[in-house]
Every structure is written in C-alpha cells, then in structure tokens.
Image: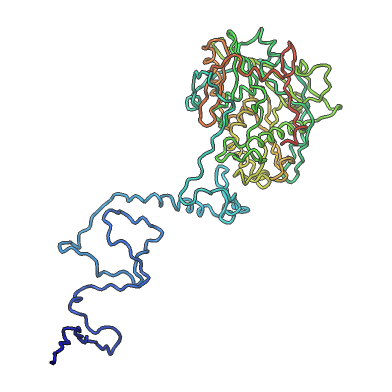
Amino acid sequence: MSETINTAAQFPTFEKPTVQFNEKGWGPCELPDTFKDVPYQPFSKNDRLGKICDWTSTSNNDKKYQNKYASTFGTGNQYAYYHEEDETTFHLVDTARVQKPPHQRGRFRNMRNSRSGRGRNARGGLNTHGHGMTTLSSKNVKARDPRRGVGKRFGNRGPPPKMRESSVAVRADWASIEEMDFPRLIKLSLPNIKEGEDITTCGTLEYYDKTYDRINVKNEKPLQKIDRIVHTVTTTDDPVIRRLSKTVGNVFATDAILATIMCSTRSNYSWDIVIEKVGDKIFMDKRDHTEFDLLTVNETSVEPPTDDDSSCNSPRNLAIEATFINHNFSQQVLKTGEQEAKYKFEETNPFISEDEDIQVASVGYRYKKWELGSDIVLVARCEHDGVLQTPSGEPQFLSIKALNEWDSKLANGVEWRQKLDTQRGAVLANELRNNACKLAKWTVQAVLAGSDQLKLGYVSRINPRDHSRHVILGTQQFKPHEFATQINLSMDNAWGILRCIIDLVMKQKDGKYLIMKDPNKPIIRLYDIPDNTFDSDDSDDGEGDDGEGFQQVYNYANNSNKI
C-alpha cells in the first residue's frame, strides 16, 4: 500500500529576495514604498541620545556642554516644524532687557577692570589701584596661600565662620539688664567735652632717641629684649585713685578701660569690664588674670587668624607676640642709662615700694578729670611712654606704640620690606583696615593723656616662621587729634558711648555689674552679677597699700620664650 507524503505542509517555502546591484556605489538603488517621503537625517554612531523635546525648560542648564547632543554631521532642517499659517514677515518687538542667568552675572567684570589697569604701578607683579589697595597680577596668582579658595570649588561658599568664645562664661545667676547694638551706639554723640584737667602726676620718663626716626628698610635695626617690669594695675587696686575717690569725682577708670568702651563699635573679639556701683560712685575694673591687656592682631581683617593654639599664628599667640613687641619697642627707642637725663613728675611711681630694687619701664602717669555733665565727673589714670625735647626747650610727651608684621601672605597684607619706604600710606591704610580697633584704642589713649605726639613703629619678623626675632623697619609720628580725624574716629561719639553706659549703670541699684561684648554679634550686654562674683580670683594676689592687692606685673623679657 503506497502513501503519498505532502512535503509542502512539513517545510516552509523560501522566497528568493530581490537583491539590487548598485553599479555606482554601495547601498540600495531605490527606497521601498514604506520609506518613501520620510526625511532622513545623517547620523554617527558617536552621537549621544538626548531629549526629544522639553516644553518646560526655558534655557539650557548645561552651559558647559551646549552641543553635547548635536550631530557630528551638523544640524539639518529636515525635522524643523513650520506652521502653515505662520507669517514669516512678523517679528515680535520686545524692548525689555534680557536678564542673564545667575552664573553669568559679573563674570567678566573683574577681567575688564584688570585689563584696563594693566601696566600702572605693576612693579614686582603687583597691581596697585587707588586707595592703597594692592592686588596680585596673574603671574603671581600661584604665590598666594594655597588654602585660599578651598571650599569654593564645586559651588560651595566655603566653610562656615568659626564661632568665637566669649571672654567670660555667662552664669545662670546673672540677670541681663540691657542689650546695646552697635548701630545705635554709633549714632550717639556728646559734644563740647573740654580737655581733661590734671589732678596729679606720677612716675619718671626717659627721652626719645631721634636716631630711630632715620631707620628705614635698608637700614633696619634689630628689636632688643628689654628686661623691665610693666605694671598693669586695675582701677580699684590703684592707691592714687583710692585716695582721690574720697574727694574728687564719681566715675573712676583707667585709660585702657575707657578706650575699650569708647572704641567698642570697632571691636570683633569679646571683652568684658566689671563695674561696681557704690552709692553715687562707679568703679570700672578689668578682671585679673585675663587677656584684657593683650593687643589683638588682625581683629578687623576680612580673614582674621584662625589657627589652633599650637601654631605660632593663632590669635592668642599673635596677641602675646604683639604685646611683647610693643613693650620692648617703647623702651628701646628711649635713651637709657644712668647718665642720661630723665623727666620726673611730681610724685614717684605709685606701684613701687621704696625698698624694692627693680628696673621699671619708663612710664608717666597723669591722673585727670573730665566734666561730662549732669554732675558726672570722670577721673582716670592716663599714661605717657616717653618725652621729647623740642628746640625751644619745652618737653613734648609721647605715646609710643608698635605695629607688627607676622606673615603678609597669610594676612593678605602688603609686603612691608617692598612698600614701606616708597608707599608708606598704603601700608598704613592696610593696617587701618586689619587693626582698626587697636589703632583707635591707641589714639583714644593718646588723646585722653594729652600726648603731643603718637609714635608708631613698624616691626617685622626676620623670618615669617620665627616669631621670636624681629627688626624695626621704620617709624612714623602723628598728632593724636589729627590722626583721629584721619582714621574717622569721632571723640564726640566716643564720649557719647561712655556717657550712655554711665547713665545706664547710674539708674541701677548698688551692686556689681558686668558689660561684655558678644563674641559673634555686634552687641554689648549689661549683666547684674552677684557681689561675690570673681572674688576668688583675687585671693592669691599680693597685698599693697591698705591691705589690698594691686601689683599685677608683666615681665615680657623673661616670658619671651613662651611666645
């Protein structure tokens, strides 16, 4: 029996495709019917696939790679959309200014300014513009501190500002009475305050050596370490003020305390002053064993020093170094020696006993009083550092201070050895910007003491990394009242701030109070504190007249190895 097998049902059929032969090139000769009238865009395998359309985006956010999704063969108009009723002759008139995106605002402004000022005062890679401002040229950009700008990459604004600590810890039993912000204090004014009247004078002054006026950068002089005792006695520990408080005045302070209050609106660091009200009398004191007498360094700078305490450039170590330099400079520029003439005041130094044989720094104390109105009489102890003999034979009293350079690169300052002889105004302007509070205090102290001249010395480190050796690069002198006008220091405003605090304390009951500058805000706070506060700090002090401790001394020459 034979069986017929149907092979067509078991195997699929194969249709031979039509193969086109292109004699002129490669590829098909004609398009199939399904692909006719479809536009073709040339493309490359390297082209990136991006967004087809985005109706919500107003601008391209990726400004760095604007052509990231563009074709290698260029853009074509095959896929361009044209509305049938679109009028090609129609144009929208818009007179509004197109606002640039935030990342493009002010991008080339500094570049245009630098190009316009190129070639002027560009000596040694520095471009010096008006008002004593110096900027680095493009060649020396790498010479700046590499730490600057760290944190500004990747869109960051840098690390948050470091929170400073207050000069004294506020306790729970302290009652806050008043907060005085700087904008209100700046507007205060107490005009027509006459010059202070001398009550008594004490101490001995040495004469200034005029050879230091001829020192310059090429003829520098090493700073010597003078082994002399410097007394820093507070108000209530002063035996002369204790004696005068029984007959004269009702407000008592020292020139350093008054200068701190009068220049409080220029301070950034925290400080505190203890005020005792006894009846109708006010005594302003500093706390013992504090850093009140240390000179700040770059306190008002845009980038103040923030290194840790182990570094020689920490704020505290720089303050100790500046105080050490200031006291040694003020004694070195005087004519020392037993044979040299000295100017003696009416009384001897009140902080030296007759049986003591110690070498004390040249200082003259002038106790003065001021009438502040409303039956307020201020009595204060002021200081002179030296005396100058004029050609007419009349003495001129001096306040001698020293500015110090520690590291111009870290401080973003001006190189003193390059600019001090040729552009001293630029150096002083930079110091006024970085140390506005310290210079204002010195000026106020010179004005209160009635000094005829304010001598400023420029002292720099021999090596920026060595904080123990220094040289004197130059000196400069000013009249205190003229210098106050130059640094925009208003004595009317200074007296107004002091009178405001005095009136505020006069309204309180008898007791102990404390005014403190907030470490991180431009605010001064007045606290009512218990009467026994800080009493334990004075238990270990020595005793002076009337059984009260008064002799707090600093020997900066012996402590120089700690700096």
The correct choice, above or below, for 475 with respect to 74 in the image is above
Q: Position of residue 286 (x, y in %)?
A: 64, 21
Q: Is residue 435 above or below residue 128?
A: above
Q: Is residue 451 visible?
A: yes
Instruction: Tell which of 387 and 235 is nearer to you.
Output: 235
Is 198 placed above or below 472 here? above
Colour scheme of this structure image? Answer: rainbow
Q: Is 467 on the left-hand or right-hand side of 485?
A: right
- Outermost residue, bottom direction? 2
Question: In the picture, which quadrant includes the C terminus?
Answer: top right
Give whichever of 60, 405 is nearer the camera: 60
Viewer-nearest residue: 509 or 363? 509
Quadrant position of residue 491? top right
Residue 471 visible somewhere in the drawing: no
Q: Is residue 386 left or right of residue 523?
A: right
Could you tell me which residue is drawn at 28 percent across and 72 percent down?
41
Q: Is residue 233 left or right of residue 497?
A: right
Which quadrant of the structure image shows residue 208? top right
Indicate left or right for 36 with 46 as reference: left
Q: Residue at x 13, y 92 (%)?
A: 2
Residue nearest the observer in this picture, 548 or 279? 548
Which residue is outermost to the front? 1
Tally of numbered tags? 0
From the top left corner, tell me how far across and down residue 121 is, in percent: 59, 51
Q: Quadrant of the N terminus?
A: bottom left
Q: Position of residue 356 (x, y in %)?
A: 82, 19
x 59%, y 53%: residue: 122
- Vertical relation: 24 (above or below) 253: below
